Image (spheres, rainbow, N blue to C red):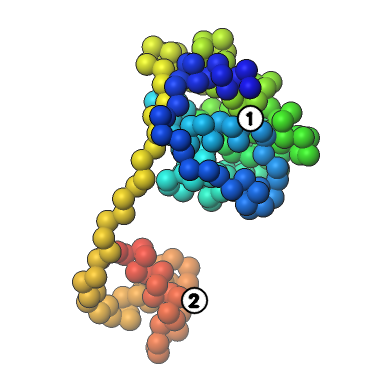
Amino acid sequence: MRDIAALTHLCPPPQDSPRPVDWAGVEAVLGVRLPEDYKRLATVYGPGVFSGYIHVYHPRGHTEFADLTGPVPGRLRAQLQRDYDQGTHPVPYDPRDLLAVGGTDNGEHLFWITDPRDAPDAWRIAVNEARGPRWFTFDGTLTAFLTSVLSGETAVPAFPKDLLEQARGFTPSLPVLSPPPDTRPRPPVASDTVRRWARANGYDVPDRGRVAAGIREAWERANPA
């Protein structure tokens, strides 16, 4: 509780209380229990960004890039696993023990080190460099990490040196409004055009006959009107 109090002093949360989170449902989706400090953090602040730089993933993130239960954590873990297996870039932890919990405007990622898996309140924080091999480890919770960094007590080498020169604060994320769907009819496209595109992109298509619906849909996604 001390860390969340210190963080709210540094970065006051929104006046409007965020909607409650179904934590049991979130943990069921992720297949793991989450740290209590993170639940308090997400409940107090909701989706948003700290000091205009550090984005913390939230179960109700307004885009897939900020959604804790969205596809990004899985994609990052898969990418790290490839690097780990192939030796492409040094990964200091088993990627299976890393769960992405945030990112920055510069492209760094924040991870929980989920070891021990059944003791989430003991998880530490790891930060990887956006365009380099360096990693930084913080021996504490996510809330303690944010408090320590934004108070100037901890300096993450990959973060901008002038980070604390910016106004400290928290900015809630706003829902992303999707444009209305385009209901205009799409002009027909010759099957030969789709076939040429499909072959160039590795699809096996016959020389004649009907192009499979899945291939035509893939062509439409790759060639929006």
Of discs 2 and 1, which sits in the foreground? 1
Query: Is 17 rendered above or below residue 206?
Result: above
Q: Which mark is residue 132?
A: none
Query: Is 71 rendered above or below residue 102?
Result: below
Query: Is 199 rendered above or below residue 77?
Result: below
Evaluate whether residue 104 shows in this view. Answer: no
Q: Which mark is residue 204?
A: 2
Residue drawn at (62%, 52%), measured in percent from left and top?
25
Q: What is the x, y in percent for residue 92?
A: 69, 30
State if disc 1 and disc 2 touch (CB < 8 Å). no
Mark 2 or 1 closer to N-term?
1
Q: What is the x, y in percent for residue 183?
A: 24, 70
Q: What is the x, y in percent for residue 79?
A: 59, 45
* Kind of residue at disc 2: Asp
Query: Which residue is identified by label 1?
Result: 37
* Kind of residue at disc 1: Asp
